[in-house]
Image (cartoon, rainbow, N blue to C red):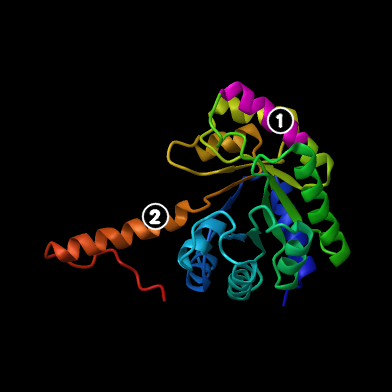
Amino acid sequence: MVSTAEKATRLQELHAAPELLLVVNVWDAITAKVVAETPGTQALATPSHGIAASRGYPDGEKIPRDEMIAEVALIVRTAGDLPVTADLEAGYGDPGGTVARAIEVGAVGCNLEDQMKPLAESVKAVEAAVAAAQSAGVDFVVNARTDAFLKGGDPEEALAEAITRGRAYLDAGASNFFAPGKLDERQVGRLVEALGERKVNLIGIPGSIPLATAQELGVSRVSYGPWSQNVALTALAKLAEDVYAGGGLPADTRKLN
């Protein structure tokens, strides 16, 4: 059995490797099983939005921390020897304590979002997360996220803000910097140039730059947040529509559970 410390080291290695790390997000035990058993999977990630939705909560730290951590624990158990990184939102008002809880259940990385709070406050949250990981003796991947591109407004201002925050979070000990949004090739290139190769992580959404381009630009990782759940729910909705129209199961349906 691979230890938590060994999984953490492996996850760090995957982020630093020249090959783009692709992570399909999972939100419960069965989705973790399906993705973990799919050839090519090297790590799993949880989406806070997806887990909250599966338990009947809206996104935005509305789900109790205990419920979020409990689901992460099930996913870690299902993932076996694969490293798991958990979306911990902004840390539920206690980023250090939340990271410590995640490590206790076997997670070896996290997303920690800034929600565009004042920079000094966001830096302290990253520092608390890093300190908790160091205290646990785990080379935990802190993926510090900015919402700069999600708030709207002038794209150039968003890019400048993201670079400022990215530098501050990396200086505070974050392993990587996550900038979700529909970024174009120029924006991604500027981020990588400013923050370093294999330091910038992106989200895959409709209209994202191609994976090959992200690889060429020096991006570290692409994950899919709630979009993997949306793909599954779209398939479910289409099944219901087809059944109600007199159809049935798609011919290419696979039995995966």
| Residue 48 lies within the magenta run | no
Residue 136, placed above or below residue 153: below
- Residue 196 appears in the picture as rendered: no
Q: Which of 138 and 118 is in front in this view?
A: 118
Res. 169 in view: yes
Q: Of the residues under marks 1 and 2, which one precedes in the sequence?
A: 1
**Which residue: 40% across, 72% down?**
256
Position of 244 relative to 231 (above/below): below
Q: Residue 163 carries which label?
A: 1
Q: How many labels does the image show?
A: 2
Where's residue 4, x and y in %?
76, 70
Q: Tag 1, which secondary structure?
A: helix
As for residue 163 lying within the magenta part, the answer is yes
Q: Where is residue 7 in the image (x, y as percent from the top left)?
A: 73, 65
Few, some or many residues within 10 Å of mark 2 (<14, 14–19, 20+): few
Q: Nearer the viewer, residue 141 or 38?
A: 141
**Range of residues picked out in magenta:** 154-167
Residue 227 x %, y %:
46, 51
Q: Position of residue 9 (x, y in %)?
A: 78, 60
Q: Which residue: 74% across, 62% down? A: 99
Looking at the rendering, which quadrant does residue 212 occupy? top right
Q: Which residue is at a point 71% across and 58% down the rendered structure image?
A: 109
Q: Mark 2 points at which residue?
A: 231
* Picture quarter with the C terminus: bottom left
Label pair 1/2, CB-CB below 8 angstroms: no
For the residues labelled 1 and 2, the Cα–Cα distance comes to: 31 Å
Does residue 11 appear left or right of residue 172 in this picture? left
**The one of 251 and 184 positioned closer to us in this rendering:** 184
**Kind of residue at badge 2:** Val
